Image: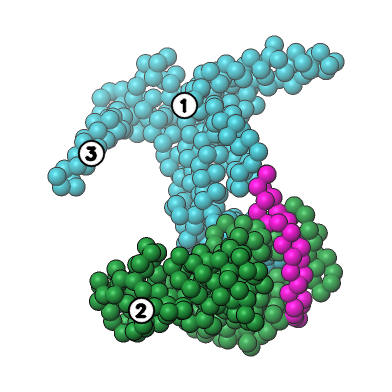
Chain colours: A green, B cyan
Amino acid sequence: MISALSFRLTKRFGTRTVLDEFALDVHGGEFVTFLGPSGCGKSTALNLLAGLLPATSGEIRLDGSPIDHLPPERRGFGMVFQNYALFPHLTVFDNVAFGLALRRRPRTEIAQRVRRMLELVQLAEYEARYPGQLSGGQQQRVAIARALAVEPRVLLLDEPLSNLDAKLRLEMRSELKRLHADLRLTSIYVTHDQAEALSLSDRVVVLRDGRVMQVGVPAEIHDRPRTRFVADFMGYRNFFPVTVDRSDGDLVLARGKDLMVTGRPVTPLAPGAAAVAAVRPEDIELTAELAGPNVVRGTVRLTEYLGREHDVEVVVDSGTTVMARVAQPVGVGAAVGLRLPPERVVVLPSEDSP
Amino acid sequence: MSVPALMLPAAIYLLVMFVYPFAYGVVLSLQAKDGGLSLANYLAFLLDPWQARTIWVTASIAVPNTVLTVLLALVVAYRMRRGMWMERTITTALVLPIALGTVLVAEGINGFYGPKGWLNQALLAVGITDPPRLTHNYTGVMIALLVQHFPFCFLMLLGYVSGIDPALEAAARVLGAGPWAIFRRVMWPLIAPGVAIAFALVFVMNFGVFPSAVLVGQPAGATRTIAIAAYQQAFEHSDMAMASAIAVVMGACQLVGLGVILVIRRRMAATGVATMGAGKR
């Protein structure tokens, strides 16, 4: 059964507010990610939804009916944990069967369902093993099968990939994507990894200090961050303090000590307003011109070879450091011009308010 | 230095302080009155109903008390596994008897539970004229042993229980397990090996009970344990050979108890229950 989930949650530990009126409507079958740095409240939110922590105030509704009063064992959710949390004394089969056995399903039905789940996560031949005999990726697949076996109304995933090594993480990410495409389960995914959030989600919620900074589809969060915090989190590494000169339709012209820049404003900005022009390293281009609009000039201080590309650290004449990712190698000490394409520059209000 | 060389001091210590006295005791226990080697001392002990009865008396204290101690410690440790209000204060209070020593605890028990103790005076004050007798009998020894061995058992089990990843419990809950199902299906299988070890250690300590049996028990009758029998042979009858024989019988009983517990634990391990646990084994 695919269920819609809506909630409004506040959580305080003593005087510290961990979640402040965090509210969201999750549609049936939607994949929503809570994204943020550690301590932003994302895992707390997931634990509140699961019922593992009591909320200070707020409500949770599943298909319109409140479920706040239900203990976790009666919410009918599935949950996948960062450290897998498999029962070490049970075989893979018994781990996956755990929730079904508690529901007192007939033995043959349990066996059938467990086998189907293990096939789904491609572990059919491992049913007699113990968790300690499996690799991290296999353990996490068992954990996913265990959560799916009970046909949860909502699937909660708490940083399920962060204990895996880089290669496995990519594989499991595709696997999660495939599972969601097949099953269309309403899913809530917690991560601090922007790439995971972008690739898996229908919608991303960026959290900071228990507050929602921005909610949107991945492309929106990626291309149109509304605050410097979100921009920073989404990989904008260059921030130039500027003052808005004038608005010009979809673009603004702004002036800073480093450069004159044209960029896209995320919110209407009046002339004279203090702002920040942000640009990603990979959007910066090397240019032969050493002056002009949207161009800064500087000296290469450091280069890092990445295989296909080079990360270059350039010290601009005014002293600011700019990070660029370029295709062709440049030498340390070379004088270079860097062009910031106007369509790739976002101009943000300089106060960090949502 | 090589590893064997590093082990030398410990080996010498064991040899001098344990192996030699133990072997000496065993040989002594086999010495007959006329000087030859025989089993006469053992037969004399086991065939004398007044003496042999001490084995039964000791077991009837040690086994129920071990069950009680481990059960109580398990319940308290399980309840405290995720921490609780005033945890440090409570733990300190529970563990204090270890630091006080057997005699002081026995004195305290006499002072509180004794015929003229606070408890009886309080009971008399509220009009209960015939309060139960709680010291200088079986009950007194049970109370004393519980007070002495509970802290040790509690600390050991708390280590086991709190060492289990809390996420396991969370996972079980989300999958539909209530408190009892969590205990039975997840926590107990993981704690059981630790409980077996705690049971074994408390049993061995209980079986050797001496000071409590004398100070708050009835050393001439209901709580005349095997250790008291050995003591009387050695220091009242100056019969070291017989005393050694009794001590060896006591050791044998403890080993049998340990063996039974370890067999049960092994069987749990064979069914997969104890293959992986709380990190400690």
| Residue wearing tag 1 | B227
- Expressed as whole percent of the image width and height from the top left, the position of residue B1 reads 14, 45
Dividing the image into 4 quarters, which one contains the C terminus of chain A?
A: bottom right
Disc 3 marks a residue whose amino acid type is: Ala
Q: Is residue A90 magenta?
A: no
Is label 2 or label 1 in front?
2
Q: Nearer the viewer, residue B137 or B154?
A: B154
Dividing the image into 4 quarters, which one contains the N terminus of chain A?
A: bottom right
Q: Nearer the viewer, residue A258 or B182?
A: A258
- SS of the residue at dot 2? loop
Within 10 angstroms of label 3, few (less than 14), some, or many (20 or more) residues?
A: some
Within 10 angstroms of label 1, few (less than 14), some, or many (20 or more) residues?
A: many
Is label 3 or label 2 in front?
2
Please give the name of the residue rendered at 31% of the width and 23% of the height, measured from the top-left corner: B33
Disc 1 marks a residue whose amino acid type is: Ala
Within 10 angstroms of label 2, few (less than 14), some, or many (20 or more) residues?
A: some
Q: Is residue A26 magenta?
A: yes
- SS of the residue at dot 1? helix
Please give the name of the residue rendered at 60% of the width and 84% of the height, measured from the top-left corner: A179
Left or right? Give the position of A336 relative to A269: left
- Expressed as whole percent of the image width and height from the top left, the position of residue B49 reads 52, 29
The answer to which image quadrant residue B231 occupies is top left
Q: Chain of mark 1?
A: B
- Magenta residues span A1-28
User: Of the numbered discs in the image, which one, if any, rests on residue B11?
Assistant: 3
Q: Nearer the viewer, residue B277 or B140?
A: B277
User: Of the numbered discs in the image, which one, if any, rests on residue A290?
Assistant: 2
Above or below, B206 relative to A306: above
Same chain for the residues at labels 3 and 2, yes or no?
no
Disc 2 marks a residue whose amino acid type is: Leu
